[in-house]
Image (cartoon, rainbow, N blue to C red):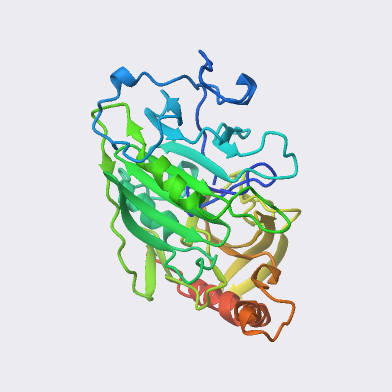
């Protein structure tokens, strides 16, 4: 599953990385070079990303953000691999994840407290992963722009917004155009350049997964974002346009087939991990098992297999799910054989992992627990709100030749 994906395909995309894997919207790989030095740092060198080195401030005139409100005592992180640098407060202690993402704590000896902030990057843009596109007939796009990547991964997010604020906002921080993506679980500032996506993320945590996030860290993170500097003068920041989508049905397909799916699910408590897609597999493909079922999606345990017939087309339906970062996901893969290929209609749904996260008061009937009770109603009506639209989408599959 993607990163953040990006991501959804912001998957898509981050989780509280010290305990749970991000997926995600998926995880990004950052910073993998030898360590030259660790001057002016406040943690042992073993805690630093592999390519950390103090910035050469005599060579940073590459047309990015000017730092106006950052104290001179702030540290500088520089990545030659991703060709950027940024400043961060001296009390933010670097703590990298296994994939190289640079993360931060405030207390070095706090084993039970998870990271509260991370910065990750990915070069290049894709839609759903190269393997998926390469397996599709006549469907691989010649190129993917930052705008297309954003539209694909951030179109849907099952998590509710924070305090009723918009999930997505286009803002300007200094000279940098930023997408502010605030949902329950993380506060994300997404920056696009002509060749990469950079994510600055704050994790507020909860009672089960506490972090050192505190009110006011958002303003500090905005100064971190503002300090971002691109080291390659040929690269530039890209402004992403937020286009309001019609709540209609979208057609997906190529010269061989097409199907339609609703742009959104009619609930705030579930959504697509990324837009539904079709995966093409050839006979003998390792992703197709002996029963003609798609087996390429990673789920916890074995999927539940059933045979269904919809509009006189026989499908092998594989369903399963998993849990991560307080979220639960469900995969529904409908696979049918047509001529010498298999077509899998894939729907991946995200929901919260239970409704307790919305509980704000011990009194269930309290007005403070409105979202909690709405979540309980969603669980009761899951079949109508989620499964029915998926099944209606499957009925639209048609082969063109």
| Residue 312 visible here | no
Instruction: Indicate the quadrant containing the C terminus: top left, top right, bottom left or bottom right.
Output: bottom left
Where residue 398 appears, as percent x and y from the top left, is: 43, 69
Answer left or right for 65 relative to 288.
Answer: left
Question: Measured along the vertical axis of the image, is residue 101 above or below residue 314?
Answer: above
Residue placed at 46% from the left, 50% from the top? 128
Decide which of 350, 51 is in the foreground and name it: 51
252 horizontally vs 321: left or right: left
Residue 98 appears in the figure = yes
Identify the image quadrant of residue 108.
top right
Of 144 and 34, nearer the camera is 34
Question: Where residue 384 sits: x, y (%)?
Answer: 59, 82
Q: Which residue is most to the bottom?
A: 365
Please tell me which residue lies in front, 120 or 4: 120
Query: Seen in the image, is 271 located left or right of residue 166?
Result: right
Q: Position of residue 142 (x, y in %)?
A: 30, 43
Image location of residue 2, percent across then percent down: 53, 47
* Res 159 quadrant in image: bottom right
| Quadrant hosting residue 226 | top left
């Amino acid at each position: 599953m993607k990163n953040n994906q990006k991501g959804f395909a912001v998957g898509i995309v981050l989780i509280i990385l010290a305990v749970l894997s991000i997926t995600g919207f998926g995880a990004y790989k950052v910073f993998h070079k030898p360590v030259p030095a660790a001057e002016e740092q406040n943690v042992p060198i073993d805690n630093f990303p592999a390519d950390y080195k103090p910035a050469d401030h005599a060579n940073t005139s590459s047309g990015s953000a000017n730092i106006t409100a950052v104290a001179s005592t702030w540290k500088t992180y520089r990545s030659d691999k991703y060709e950027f640098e940024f400043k961060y407060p001296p009390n933010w202690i670097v703590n990298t994840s296994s994939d190289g993402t640079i993360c931060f704590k405030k207390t070095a000896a706090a084993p039970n407290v998870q990271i509260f902030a991370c910065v990750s990057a990915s070069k290049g843009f894709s839609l759903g992963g190269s393997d998926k596109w390469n397996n599709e007939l006549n469907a691989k796009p010649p190129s993917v722009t930052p705008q297309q990547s954003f539209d694909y991964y951030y179109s849907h997010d099952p998590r509710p917004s924070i305090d009723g604020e918009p999930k997505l906002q286009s803002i300007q921080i200094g000279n940098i155009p930023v997408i502010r993506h605030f949902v329950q679980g993380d506060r994300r500032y997404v920056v696009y350049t002509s060749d990469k996506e950079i994510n600055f993320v704050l994790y507020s945590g909860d009672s089960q997964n506490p972090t050192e996030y505190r009110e006011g860290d958002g303003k500090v993170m905005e100064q971190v974002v503002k300090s971002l500097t691109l080291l390659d003068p040929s690269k530039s920041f890209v402004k992403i346009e937020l286009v309001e989508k019609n709540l209609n049905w979208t057609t997906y397909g190529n010269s061989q087939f097409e199907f339609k799916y609703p742009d959104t699910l009619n609930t705030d408590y579930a959504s697509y991990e990324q837009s539904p897609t079709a995966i093409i597999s050839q006979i003998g493909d390792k992703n197709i098992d002996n029963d003609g079922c798609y087996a390429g999606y990673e789920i916890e345990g074995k999927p539940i297999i059933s045979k269904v017939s919809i509009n006189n087309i026989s499908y092998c339906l594989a369903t399963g799910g998993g849990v991560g970062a307080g979220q639960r996901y469900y995969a529904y893969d409908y696979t049918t054989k047509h001529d010498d290929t298999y077509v899998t209609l894939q729907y991946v749904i995200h929901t919260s992992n239970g409704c307790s996260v919305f509980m704000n008061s011990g009194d269930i009937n309290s007005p403070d627990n409105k979202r909690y009770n709405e979540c309980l109603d969603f669980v009761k009506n899951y079949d109508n709100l989620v499964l029915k639209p998926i099944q209606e989408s499957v009925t639209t599959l048609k082969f063109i030749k």
